[in-house]
């Protein structure tokens, strides 16, 4: 929900913010209830769909990325005028004492109507609707299809897996700011928000459950983001420090990737300074859209009789991790190969944890 090319390594950006944010004020407040069937669905989303609570960060990071991609697309097509606030980034702030985690993106933001439509309706995917709109208007839907992640419209509600109170502030550039608040128990409050400390974007603050307070610590948040979302194309800052320093080089043409980038990626992937022997970087469009980068190491543990190698090829979809060490991608006798396979056409289930 939160500027640089998807083709290049992220660059550090400087974010200048007031030391003390402006005091927001609210007006035109409304209390709304989810429909009866929606209330039951929200409970299912929070307690049944996701098997591991850490995935809430993956879902929120994906929403941030989509919001940034929409703004970038609008700038490219001339739907939005360029301004001084066009730095595209995601910022995360943790507060262990208050047991909160706050996530901000400088993306497209939402109007009051969009907040009610998108956050008040479970299984309504704003990203899916955006792609559909671009397709119908013939305005380069393919330009964003590779980068827009959201599909099902339930990812935001994974917030209630780890929290009992969610507050959202959102603002489209030039429009009135909006505040949305819910405890996930069947109702939400939406109001106009004045004097927000940002001109465009969305900020989400989660009040974590006592049993989920570990997500208010830097260490676990950084580890989780690097596991699921480090290849998002925009800088992610955790308490002021950029933590996604690697780009998804498998999305680029092999003619554009340098030897140093290949070596650095392998070091990170294999957790070793020993260089690789060979690599295979390829992509296909039919019958499936697949982008892949595979390495053959120069050595492995089985040569020393220490242990049997396990598969170290990770499955991604649109740069988001779906399954680590996926054993179904290659036959067992190729278990020494390391790398990534990214397929946009995976028929993912609603939690994006299986395919």
Image: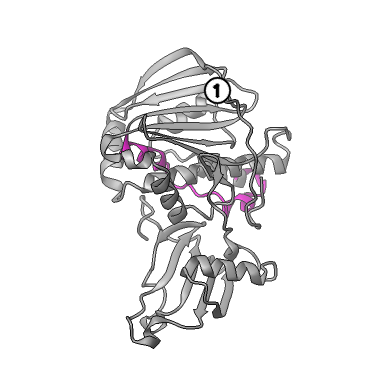
Q: Outermost residue toward the top?
A: 27
Question: Dividing the image into 4 quarters, which one contains the C terminus?
Answer: bottom left
Answer with left or right where residue 162 lies relative to residue 112: left
Answer with left or right where residue 138 lies relative to residue 34: right
Position of 264 relative to 310 (above/below): above
Locate residue 175, reporting x and y percent: 61, 22
Locate residue 293, reporting x and y percent: 54, 71
Q: Residue at x 58, y 51 (%)?
A: 233
Magenta span includes 148: yes
Q: Which residue is mark 1?
A: 21
Nearest to the observer: residue 160 or residue 290: 160
Answer with left or right where residue 269 lies relative to residue 50: right
Magenta region: which residues? 136-163
Magenta span includes 74: no
Locate residue 204, reporting x and y percent: 46, 32
Nearest to the observer: residue 295 or residue 100: 100
Q: Residue at x 36, y 26 (%)?
A: 182
Position of 97 relative to 145 (above/below): above
Q: Residue at x 45, y 26 (%)?
A: 116
């Amino acid at each position: 929900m939160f500027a640089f090319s998807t083709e290049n390594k992220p660059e550090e950006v400087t974010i200048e913010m007031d030391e003390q944010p402006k005091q927001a004020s609210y007006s035109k407040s409304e209390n709304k209830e989810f429909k009866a069937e929606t209330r039951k669905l929200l409970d299912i989303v929070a307690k049944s769909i996701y098997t591991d609570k850490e995935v809430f960060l993956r879902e929120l990071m994906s929403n941030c990325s989509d919001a940034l991609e929409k703004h970038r697309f609008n700038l490219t097509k001339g739907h939005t005028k360029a301004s001084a606030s066009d730095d595209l980034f995601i910022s995360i702030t943790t507060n262990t004492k208050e047991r909160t985690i706050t996530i901000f993106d400088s993306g497209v933001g939402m109007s009051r109507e969009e907040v009610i439509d998108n956050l008040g309706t479970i299984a309504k995917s704003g990203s899916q609707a955006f792609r559909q709109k671009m397709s119908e208007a013939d305005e380069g839907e393919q330009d964003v299809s590779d980068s827009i992640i959201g599909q099902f419209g339930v990812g935001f509600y994974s917030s209630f897996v780890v929290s009992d109170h969610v507050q959202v502030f959102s603002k489209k550039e030039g429009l009135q700011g909006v505040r949305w608040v819910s405890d996930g128990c069947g109702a939400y409050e939406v109001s106009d928000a004045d004097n927000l400390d940002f001109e465009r974007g969305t900020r989400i603050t989660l009040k974590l459950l006592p049993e989920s307070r570990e997500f208010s610590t830097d260490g676990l948040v950084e580890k989780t983001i690097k596991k699921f979302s480090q290849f998002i194309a925009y800088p992610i800052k955790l308490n002021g420090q950029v933590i996604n320093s690697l780009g998804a080089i498998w999305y680029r043409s092999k003619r554009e990737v340098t030897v140093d980038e290949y070596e650095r990626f392998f070091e990170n992937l294999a957790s070793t300074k020993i260089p690789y022997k060979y690599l295979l970087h390829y992509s296909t469009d039919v019958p499936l859209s697949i982008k892949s980068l595979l390495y053959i190491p120069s050595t492995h543990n089985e040569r020393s009789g220490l242990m049997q190698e396990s598969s170290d090829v990770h499955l991604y979809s649109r740069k988001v991790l779906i399954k680590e060490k996926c054993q179904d991608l290659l036959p067992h006798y190729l278990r020494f190969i390391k790398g990534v396979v990214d397929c946009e056409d995976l028929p993912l289930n609603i939690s994006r944890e299986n395919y």
